Image (cartoon, coloured by chain):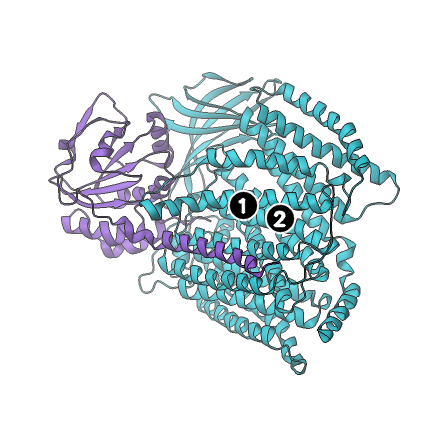
Amino acid sequence: MNRTRLFIPLGVFCLILFVSYVGFSLDDRHELPSALLGKPFPDFQAPMLYDPETIVTREHLLGEPTLVNVWATWCPTCKAEHAELMRIAATTGVRMVGLNYKDVGSKARRWLADYGDPYELVIVDADGAIGVELGVYGAPETFLLDAQGIVVYKRVGDVNERIWRDELAPRLAQMGVYKGLAKDASIQAANTADRP
Amino acid sequence: MIAEIGQLSLALAACLALAAGATGMFSQAPGLRLLRQSTTSMVVGQFVFVSFAFVALVWSFATDDFSVAYVANHSNSLLPLPYKISATWGGHEGSFLLWILIMSGWMLALASRRANYPERFFGRVLGIMSLLNLGFICFSLFTSNPFARMIPMTPADGADLNPLLQDFGLIVHPPLLYAGYVGLAVPFAFAIAAMLERRVDAAWARWSRPWTNIAWAFLTVGVALGSWWAYYELGWGGWWFWDPVENASFMPWLAATALIHSLAVTEKRGTFKSWTLLLAIAGFSLSLIGAFIVRSGVLTSVHAFAVDPERGKFILLFLAFVVGGSLILYGLRAGGQRADVGFKIFSREFFVLTNNVVLVVALAVVMWGTLAPIGYEAISGARISIGKPFFNMFFVPLMLVLGAALGLVPVLNWKRTAWQNIKSAVTLLLPVAVLLASLGFYLTEPKSAAVLAALVVAMWVITTHTVDIWRRSRSGRLPPLAYWGMTLAHLGFAVSVIGIAITSTQSIEEDVRMEPQQVVQLGKAEVRFLGVRTVQGPNYQAQQGIFIVTSASGETFELRPEKRRYLAGGNVMTEAGIQAGFFADTYISLGEPLSDDAWAVRLHYKPLVRWIWFGALMMGFGGGLAVLDKRYRRLRTRHDKPALNATAKQSTA
């Protein structure tokens, strides 16, 4: 038997290792500069999830700092992220708005009933039109707006403990919506649910 | 104090692991016999100190020592005691300590059987295991220390165990699953030792087989338990989600399944040696890759552990070292001793080969589905989800091929089988199988070709194996336990196939709005909603719905699904109401409250869903039964001869 053939498994493994390494060190790449950063959140008109008659516009997001979270029931990452959103909603006063992206209304309502609803209101973007305006290229994504509706920060991928601690909490503290960075550390570690 | 003792014990265990690794691996010279033998006592020492550490952590949980950060994050004074104890492995740090404990347990079990193996070879095995254990313990000590204290900021109460995990399933699922994962380190260590000692032979295969079988049995039962837990606890009514973490447990299972078959050929016929080595390495490597996937946060999933880049780096390095190293060794040492044993198409060898090819292709599919999203993300930056359709597209045909081949196993001999035997089996038994399958198919609604195919394949396996049992027991001499184990496992596969085919096509799911006293039709059953009441649990408050179900046969039972709010964390959990039955489950979960007294309710009727896990249990028990076979107990008397041969070979070489 040709000895080089016996090294094929090693090659396959190196490839897998490389992909894992790239995927693993990818976390930094989520901080992609968004074209929207420092610019006003785009205008939109969309119905609410629980009240399809009412139309929400950009005006509804003004007045106080707001987290806009793009999510969908088909997106497993959103499920992973949900506990952290619930925790943020429960422990801070920040207004959170959900943007239900390319989803089915009944499924979305069922999801929120099952896992809890961290949002003050949920906007429906059934055909993904707002998503195009926002430059969304996957779910979940999260935008932090200041009281004037300017995009201060954008996160592509899940909001996890680290993003909360390093990116969101300091910015919210700066805006004066959130105090208690210090006391937060323990609660936070506790609530980032570990599962086998 | 107790926690510090635990920490110290763990550090001592690491020292012993290092020392045992050194003596096991590098004391091959004849004069170092005493040093070599000390390896065994140091292996026992590792187990003792790791047990101390584990007990210390359990103790900290049982006594509500919230100054230990891990306890504070995963327990609460309101938690019932059994859950306090199982909370020990309810998070990353503690579950890894359990992993280490089980690893040490496997080493202890190995050490207790040391008389069965040649001393030098066995020293290597224990040395390799110790070095692996050293890596695990260092990972625990340096990146995920379960004993870290929070002083002086000790919280008054803990944050509570995730309610999903406050359940019987969590008590038993991780220990069994880890026993399987870590157990694969044993055939791995045997394979590495065999390559180092240049004795990849039939004796090596015979030594590996019982260990591989037990590890595989644990893994099988562990994976099945995980699936059962997801079914009743997550409230979606599904039993497998192709979630990355599930895949992480499924990949080593596929490799281990291929391995136990390939080992059989290596032992009996002396062929497939390189392939068996590779599978032994792959099985354990996939366990490690699974650990990496789950614990590094490279993939987000329902199971995701707290993410920490340090851990990911450590595991990746460990992985590169262990797997990379063993594959380099494989490249250098495997394939040398190619046995020149031929076999025909209708032989056990060829069918094991078919089994292995199918399982490895399945493994590649699962791996692709798990890793491709990461690769895609690396290129385009966006996360995608590869879902059920992708996996089903491959798995349905693959498992049908596997089953069709499996049905012929009882007829096949090693090397070659007379065409007459095959022909008579097919002409006699295939019609019987098709007839039985058609009877079942007649009852299905909706009907599909896939269901018919699955039923035929399953019945084919059941028919041929049952006839074989009958034939053998008629001959007067009772077949050995290994035969019964294999047959039970094969029948288990057929049972699982039936369960999967029927459940995934014949289930009924209704999402309805129900008011009190309203009656809804679920298939042939009637479901009456009586209302919702508030119930107080030990550490939660629940809205409990009461439903009366009248089945098609007129039987009446009550189901009480709950929506629980846990007091400590404020988490809301759905607890499904399930009437489990051999032929079907009725499954109700409570959705959201709607206007007035109405509730959104999800009703499921799931025929034969239990068969999936029942079949898996049969496979697991089959694996365990095979290990009890007499031939493995006689190892001691048998090994002398091959050991002598080996030394003779070496002296001539």
**Corner quadrant of residue B19:** bottom right
Residue B475 position within the rendered picture, expressed as x and y whole percent measured from the top left: 88, 40
Residue B143 position within the rendered picture, expressed as x and y whole percent measured from the top left: 40, 63
User: The N terminus of chain B appears in which quarter of the rendering?
Assistant: bottom left
Give residue B363's mark.
1
User: The C terminus of chain B appears in which quarter of the rendering?
Assistant: bottom right
| Residue B167 visible, this orientation | no
- Residue type highlighted by circle 2: Ala
The residue positioned 27% from the left and 26% from the top of the image is A50
**What residue is pinned by disc 2?**
B258
| Residue B546 visible, this orientation | yes
The residue positioned 62% from the left and 18% from the top of the image is B553
Q: In this view, does B401 lie to the left or right of B652?
A: left
**Corner quadrant of residue B49:** bottom right
User: Rounded to the nearest whole Å, what is the CA distance between mark 2 and mark 1?
Assistant: 10 Å
Tag 2–tag 1 contact (CB < 8 Å):
yes
The image shows residue B594, relative to residue B357, as above or below, that is above
Chain represented in cyan = B
Chain represented in purple = A
Classify 10 Å Cα crowding around label 2: few (below 14), some (14-19), many (20 and above).
Answer: many
Tell me the chain of label 2: B
Q: In this view, does B32 lie to the left or right of B14?
A: right
User: Is disc 1 placed on a helix, strand or loop?
Assistant: helix
Front in this rendered view, residue B321 or B127: B321
The residue positioned 42% from the left and 49% from the top of the image is B161
